[in-house]
Image: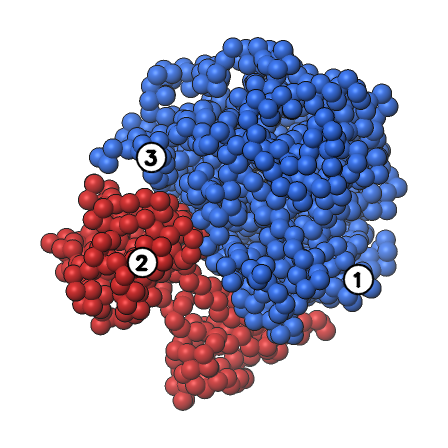
Amino acid sequence: MDKWNLIVDVAQCHNCNNCVLAAKDEYVGNEFPGYSASHPKQGRGVIAIDSTYRGSSAMVDVAHRPKLCQHCDNAPCVAKGQGAVSKRPDGIVIFDPVKAKGRKDLVEVCPHGAVIWNEELELPQNWIFDAHLLDQGWNMPRCEQVCPTGAISSVKVSDEKMQALVQELGLEVERAELKPRVYFKNLYRETQVFIGGSLQLERDGLLDCAAQVEVALVKEGQELARTTSDLFGDFRFDGLEPNSGVYCLEISAAPGDAKTVQCDLKAESIVLEPFTL
Amino acid sequence: PDGSRRFTTLTNGGPLFVHVKDDKILRVTPIEFDAKDADSWSIDARGKRFTPKRKATVAPHAMSMKSVVYSDKRVLYPMKRVDFDPNGERNPQNRGISGYERISWDEALDIVSSEIKRQKQKYGPGSMTIAHGSHHQWGNVGYYLSSLLRFGNLIGFTRLSLNPDSWEGWYWGAQHHWGHSQRVGIAGNYGTVEDCLQEAEMMVFWSCDAESTNGGYMGFEGTQRRLWAKELGIEFVHIDPHYNPTAQLLGGRWIPIKPTTDPALAQAIMYVWVTEGLYDQEYVAQRTTGFEEWRDYLLGKEDGTPKTPEWQEPETGVPARVVRALARQWGGKKTYLAAGANGSGFGGAGRGATGAQWARCMVMMMAMQGLGKPGVNMGNLQAGTPLDHEFYFPGYADGGISGELVFNGNAVNNYQKMPHVITMNPVRQMIPKQQLPEAIINGKAEGYLWDGVATELQFAPFQYPMPGYSPIHMIYKYGGSYFSTLTESSRMVEAYRHDSIDCVVNQSIWMEGEAQFADIILPACTAFERYDIGEWAAGGGYLPHGFNGTNHRIVALQHKCIEPRGESKSDYEIFSLILQRLGLGAIFNEGCSELDWCKRVFNSSDVSKRISWKEFCKKGYYVVPAEKPALRSPVNFRWFAEGRMKDIQEAMPLPSQWAEDFGKGLQTPSGKLEFMPETLKRSDPNNPERPVLNRYIPAWEGPHSKELFGKYPLQMIATHSRYSFHTHVDGKNGFTQDITDHRVCIGGHYYWLVRLNARDAEARGIAHGDLVKVFNDRGAILCAAHVTSGVANGVVKSFEASAEYDLRELDGEQLEVGGCMNILTPSRSQQRGTSSMSPNSCLVEVMRWDGSRPGDA
Ligand SMILES: Nc1nc2c(c(=O)[nH]1)N[C@H]1C(S)=C(S)[C@@H](COP(=O)(O)OP(=O)(O)OC[C@H]3O[C@@H](n4cnc5c(=O)[nH]c(N)nc54)[C@H](O)[C@@H]3O)O[C@H]1N2
Ligand SMILES: Nc1nc2c(c(=O)[nH]1)N[C@H]1C(S)=C(S)[C@@H](COP(=O)(O)OP(=O)(O)OC[C@H]3O[C@@H](n4cnc5c(=O)[nH]c(N)nc54)[C@H](O)[C@@H]3O)O[C@H]1N2
Ligand code: SF4
Ligand code: SF4
Ligand SMILES: [Ca+2]
Ligand SMILES: [Ca+2]
Ligand SMILES: [Mo+4]
C-alpha cells in the first residue's frame, strides 16, 4: 500500500517560515473533527524552524530545518497513547482530539520534540500531515504547497519504493530506530562540522589571496581528502564528525614545499586564521 | 468538499485563494494554476530549459493574513478619547495617555465632518494634513493613492512631501549619473532574467537581500530563478554586514562590511580596475563622460590619497587581498551587479549617511564594466521576466479612482481609459515628511522635493508654512506606522501633544501604538472585507511594469470574502459618509459602490478584451499569457551599449528630456553615463556634502564620530523585516509573533530582535536569548539578543517597522518595549540640500538588561 513520506532538503530551506505559517493558518481557529482540534493561537506551532550556524568571520553557513512530527512507524507516542494516538494505514500518525485530552505525557514521550501542548484544550497536538486535506483529495500537504525553494516534498509510495528512493537520493533519517517517515537530504549541514581557512601570499609587498593552492586533510598519517583554494584563497573540508580530534592540513605552498597546520576539532567548525604561504 | 467557498485576493506578498465557510476565513492558499490558465514562458540557457512553477509564490506576510484579520487588536467600533471634547476642553497634552470610549458611527462622523468644516472656517485652507504610510493593502480602488487622495482633494489638505525613502541614495545621487528620474533614480530590468541566465558568470549581491524583500511585492517569484543561476554554476558574492537569507540560500563568498563604508570598498575596486586595466576602455570612451577626473581621483592625483585596497581596509573591515581578488574576478568575468531589492536599485546601504555616495558608485562601476553588454548588467533575477509588457492593466500608482492628475500616473494611463470626475487639491503647502514633528513643534520646516518628473526638481527648497496658507491644526492620520518607520521617531510624541493641534483623527484597522494618539479613531476594515481589483506587483506610475518581477501576470478581483468585522467599514465607505455630511457624497462616489468601481477598472483594462466580467468574477483571476518568444523585450541598456535607439517598453524620459535626438542616449545632459554629473555641476556645484566628484566622505554618524563612537561603539542597521511588510502583519498577536527570527517571547512578552556578533556579545556578557537594552542619546529599547556568527563585528542588525509602540517606565527608566528601533536613528538628512533619511548610520550601545520586565507588576 502507498504511504506518505516527507523529504526535507536541509540545504534548500531558507527559513522563510511559510510552512510554519501555513500550519498555523490551517489549524488555529479551525476544528477538523476526527483529525484535529483548534491549535493555540500563540506559541511554537506544530512546525517550527531550527537553525544551526557554523563557522566564523567570513566563512559562515547556516542550516535551517523544519521540525515537525515524523510520523514514525515505531512511534513511542502511539505505544504510550493506548488508543489516543493512532497510526493510519497510509503512515500518518494522528493524535485524537478527543481521546488524547489531558495526556501531557504524550508531549514528553516524543523523542523528536514534535508535539505541542495546547494549554487551553489540554491537548497534545502534532502536525497531522494535513490528513484531513489529503482525505479530501489534496495531493500534497500545505507546507509543501507554500515552500518556495522545494525544500519540502511529500511522496506517497510503497515502503519498498521509498527505500529505493532513500538509496537513490542518499537520504538520511534521525533516530532510525523509530522508523520515521521524514527523510533528510544534506543533513550534514546541521550534524557535521568543517575545517576551513584562507590562504594568502605576499606579492610586491602586498598580501594577495592565494588561489589554486592544494590542501590535503590528513588524520593519523592518512590523507582523507584534498581540495584547492578558490579565487579568494578559501578552502574548506566539510562533513567531518564533531569532536573527532586532531587533523593536519598539508598546504602545498610550492611544488615540493608543503606546510602543515594542526587543529583539534571539537564540537564547532574551525575557521583558521589567514595562513601566509 | 468541506462546504467552503473559494475567493481570491491580492496582498503585498502575492495573490491568495481565500477559503471561506460560514462568513469565516478558513484558510488562505497560494493560487495554483489550472489547465485553462495561460502557458508559462521558458528560457533556454547553456543547454538547459527553465520554466517556472505553475503557481504564484507568496511571502510569509501573506501567509499570516488570517491572523491579523482576526486580531484582537482590530478596532471594531468608532472611538473617542475620553477627555477630548470638541466643544470644550480638548486636552491635547493627554494624547497617548488617556483612554477611549466607544461612540456611534453617527457621532463619529458628525465630529469629524464638523471638525473639517471648523478648520476651514477658522484657519483656512491647509490647516488639515493627511498623513499616511507608503504601503497599503492591495487594490486600485481602496488604495491611498486612489480613494484617500480623492477624499483629500475634495476637502483640501496640506500634503506631506514624502522623502524617497526606498530610493534615497539613488534619487539624490545615482540619478545624476544615469538619469531615470521617472524611476526615482533606479533602472528597469527588462530582459535581464534571460540575459543573466544565458551570459553572466558572476553575480555580486551588494546590499541585496532578495529572499527577504521579495523585490517588494513579488512573493518568492525570484527564488526559483536564482536557484537556476546556482544550478548553472554562476558564482555569487554577497557584500553585506549581515549574512542575510539570500547569502544563506545561495552560498558564495560573504564579504562582511561595516555599514556606510561601502563607497570606500567600491572605490578601491575601481582603483584596481584602473591600475590593472580591468575595465572596458572602449565603452568608457564612447558611452561615458568625465572619466579622467574620476580616474585621477582614484589614483590620488586629486587629493594625494590613492584609493587602494589597503586604504579602504581600516575603513570597511574588508581585507585588502579580498578586495583585489574580487576586483580581478569582477573585471575578468561577465558580472551582474545585484544592488538592493530590485537589483538595479534600493538597498539598506542607500539609507545611511553615505547612501548617495554608494548608489553613485554602483552606477560608475557599471559604467566601467560596460553596462548593457551581454551578461554585464544590473539585476538580481528578481525582475525582468519575459512577460507581455503591452497588455494593459493599471498599477496602484496609476491613480485608481483619485481623479488626481498630477501626483500619480493617472493622467498618463488610467484617466484616459477610465474617465472619472477630476479632483484637485488647491492647497500647495507641503510639509517634508521626515520633518513633520519640527513643522508642528517649531512651526516651520524646509524640504526638498521628491518629484520624479525631472531631475532638476530636487534642487528647489520649499518652505512650510507657505505664505497664504494656514499652518496645520488638524491631522488626519491613516494607520499607525510612524513610530517605527520615521527616523528619531519619539519626536512624534511631542508633536502629537502640541497645543496647536486641535484634532487628530486616525482611520485605522488596528489599535496600534500610534493610533492611541488620536482623538477620534475610525475603524477601517481589511481588504478581505470589501471589494477591490488589482494586478499582482503592478506598481504603475513610478514603478512601471513592476509586474515583470513575477513569473506570471495575475489580475484578480479582490472579493469581499467576509462581512466587515464589528462595526468597521471600508475606507471608501468612511470617506463617502464623511463627505455626504459635507454635501460632497455624490462627487466622491459618482453613485458607485466599490464593486461598481472594480467593474469600471476592469472595463478600462485589456482583461475585458479577453474574458467577460462575469467569468472574471467567478474565477476570480486572469493569467495574462506570456509574451511570444519573438516579441520578448530586448535587454535593458543593450541599446545603449550598442549605441542604438532605445528599444525597450519604458516610455521615459519625457520627449523634451532627450539631449540628443528623441530615443537616443540617456536622460543625462550628455545622453551618456556621467562620472562628473552635469546636473550637479549646473545646480549644486559647491555642496561639500554632495560634491560633483563623488569623493568618499565617511558617515557623519559612524566610526569617525569620535566622541559619540566612544560612547556608542556599535553600528546599528535596522532594515526591512522579512516576515512582516513594514508594520503590516507584525505584532497584533498575529502568527509572526512566534517566528523565532522575528520576535522572541520572554516571560510572556514578545520582544523585537537585535542580532549581534558572538564577539561583541561576549564582550558585553550577553548570551543568545538574553534581554538587552539597546540605547543611545535618543532613547532606549528592550530587545531580545540574537547572538550569531552571521553579523559583522561591531554591527547590530535589527529591523524597522515594529507595529507596536509601547513605552514603559522600568526601574525609573523610559524604555520602549515594542521594538520601535527608529527611536534610536538620526533624523538628519543624508546630505545638505536633500530631504532624505539615513536610519542606517546609527550608533548604539547594547547591554544586558537584568532589571524589571514589562510583564512584571
Ligand atoms: N530604520 C529604517 N526605517 C525605515 C526604512 C529602513 O530601511 N530603515 N525604510 C523606509 C522605507 S523604504 C519605507 S517604504 C517606509 C515605510 O514606512 P510606512 O509607510 O510608514 O510603513 P507602513 O507599515 O507601510 O505603513 C502603512 C500604514 O498604513 C496602514 N494601512 C495599510 N493599509 C490600510 C488600509 O487599507 N486602510 C487604512 N486605514 N490603513 C491602512 C497600516 O496599518 C500602516 O499603519 O519605512 C521607512 N523607514
Ligand atoms: N518582507 C518585506 N519585504 C519588503 C519590505 C518589507 O518591509 N518586508 N519593504 C519593501 C520596501 S518598501 C522596500 S523600499 C524594499 C527595501 O529593499 P532594500 O532596500 O533592498 O532592503 P533593506 O532590507 O533595507 O537592505 C537590504 C540589505 O542591505 C543590507 N545593508 C544595510 N546597510 C548596509 C550597508 O551599509 N552596506 C551594505 N553593503 N549592506 C547594507 C542589509 O543588511 C540587508 O541585507 O523592500 C520591500 N520588500
Ligand atoms: S515524531 Fe514524535 S509525535 Fe510524531 S510519530 Fe514520532 S514519536 Fe510520535
Ligand atoms: S517553507 Fe520551505 S524554505 Fe520556507 S521555512 Fe519551510 S521548508 Fe524552509
Ligand atoms: Ca505584447
Ligand atoms: Ca513586446
Ligand atoms: Mo520603501
Proximity of marks 3 and 1: CB atoms separated by less than 8 Å: no
Residue matched to label 2: A122
Instruction: Report the amino acid beneath label 1.
Output: Leu
Above-or-below relation of B325 to B47: below
* Furthest residue toward bottom: A220
Q: Colour of chain B?
A: blue
Instruction: Please give left or right for residue A220 compared with residue B507 in the image.
Output: left
Q: Are marks 2 and 1 on the same chain?
A: no
Q: Residue at x 45, y 38 (%)?
A: B69
Q: CA distance from mark 3 to mark 1?
A: 54 Å
Q: Is residue A239 visible from the viewing direction of this image?
A: yes
Host chain of mark 1: B
Residue matched to label 3: B19
Q: CA distance from mark 3 to mark 2?
A: 28 Å
Instruction: Please tell me the numbered disc located at residue A99.
Output: none
Near-viewer residue (A97 or B328): A97
- Nearest to viewer (mark 2 / mark 1): 2
Which element carries disc 3, helix, strand or loop? strand
Instruction: Please give left or right for residue B151 compared with residue B620 in the image.
Output: right
Q: Is residue B346 visible from the viewing direction of this image?
A: no
Near-viewer residue (B354 or A225): B354
Neighbourhood count class around disc 3 (C-alpha, 10 Å): few under 14, some 14–19, many 20 upward: some
Q: Position of residue B147 (x, y in %)?
A: 58, 22
Q: Position of residue B515 (x, y in %)?
A: 62, 39
Instruction: Please give left or right for residue B806 compared with residue A171 in the image.
Output: right
Instruction: Report the amino acid beneath label 3.
Output: His
- Nearest to viewer (mark 3 / mark 2): 2
Near-viewer residue (A218 or A137): A137
Instruction: Report the amino acid beneath label 2.
Output: Glu
